[in-house]
Image (cartoon, rainbow, N blue to C red):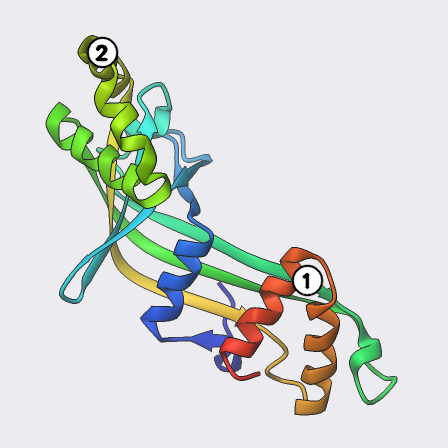
Amino acid sequence: MYLPNHFKLEDLAHARRLIEEQPLGLLLGRDPQGASFASHLPLCWGDEGEHWWLDGHLARANPQSAWLADQPEQLLVFSGPDAYVSPRHYEHERNVPTWNYLALHLRVRAELIDEPAAKDALLKRLIARHEPGYAAQWRGLPEDFQHKLLAAIVGLRLHVLGWEFKAKLSQNRSAPERQRLREQLEAGTPRERDLAGWMRNLGL
């Protein structure tokens, strides 16, 4: 993506924060004919040393699950809060509207997980992340029903090969202009307030 230096975030902690706040990723690849194809996937962070990855799963009926065996390298995108920015916040009239946003792009290599016990362990990690209280209900389901559900999905571990994080938060504007914008966002919608929170967190 187009990424001017003043909008670039390079601290991995910021990438992890965005993924944990907005865990629905967009996995982008191509079908066998070369046409673009994408799947929206809830994903969960994992790491060991400097290596990190995202865990999730695809429906077996989703054709992308079959293509990943031949095309394991994909683009994974996470989007954060965003908001319209009015030029009324600026000090001079000769300005135009813009849009502020957060976007995280990851180059990943997909590892398919299809062994039942490994898929069950993956699902339990996802349950622990999103709804720990559901774990007991999952364990209490009839075994044949669990096997049927597990057979309908393909587990996925997306190993991160590289990443870029764009935080377009008016870093190219003066401090008074950013303050006026942040105050406006703090009084706005939940999504606008979330964007203001990122500005505060980054000291903008």
Q: How far apart are marks 1 and 2 (CA)?
A: 46 Å
* Secondary structure of the residue carrying numbered label 2: loop
Which residue is situated farthest in the top direction here?
144
Residue 17 location, quadrant:
bottom left
Percent of width and height locating residue 185: 70, 69
* Image quadrant in which you'd find residue 117: top left
Of 144 and 177, the residue lying toward us: 144
Residue at 19 percent across and 30 percent down: it is 119
**Is label 1 or label 2 in front?**
2
Left/right of residue 51 with respect to residue 178 in the rendered view:
left
Q: Nearer the viewer, residue 62 or 125?
A: 125
Q: Are marks 1 and 2 in contact (CB under 8 Å)?
A: no
Q: Give the percent coordinates (x, y) of residue 18.
A: 44, 60
Taking the spot 84% from the left edge, 77% from the top edge, the residue there is: 88
Q: Residue at 62% across / 60% down in the picture?
A: 82
Image check: 179 left or right of 108?
right
Q: Quadrant of residue 38?
A: top left
Instruction: Identify the amino acid type marked 1.
Output: Ala
Give the secondary structure at mark 1: strand
Mark 1 lies on residue = 83
Residue 182: % across, % down: 68, 76
Q: Residue 142 carries which label?
A: 2
Vertical side of 118 occupied by 199: above or below = below
Circle number at residue 170: none
- The residue drawn where x is 37% and y is 24% is 62
Q: For this view, does 39 lie left or right of residue 64? A: right
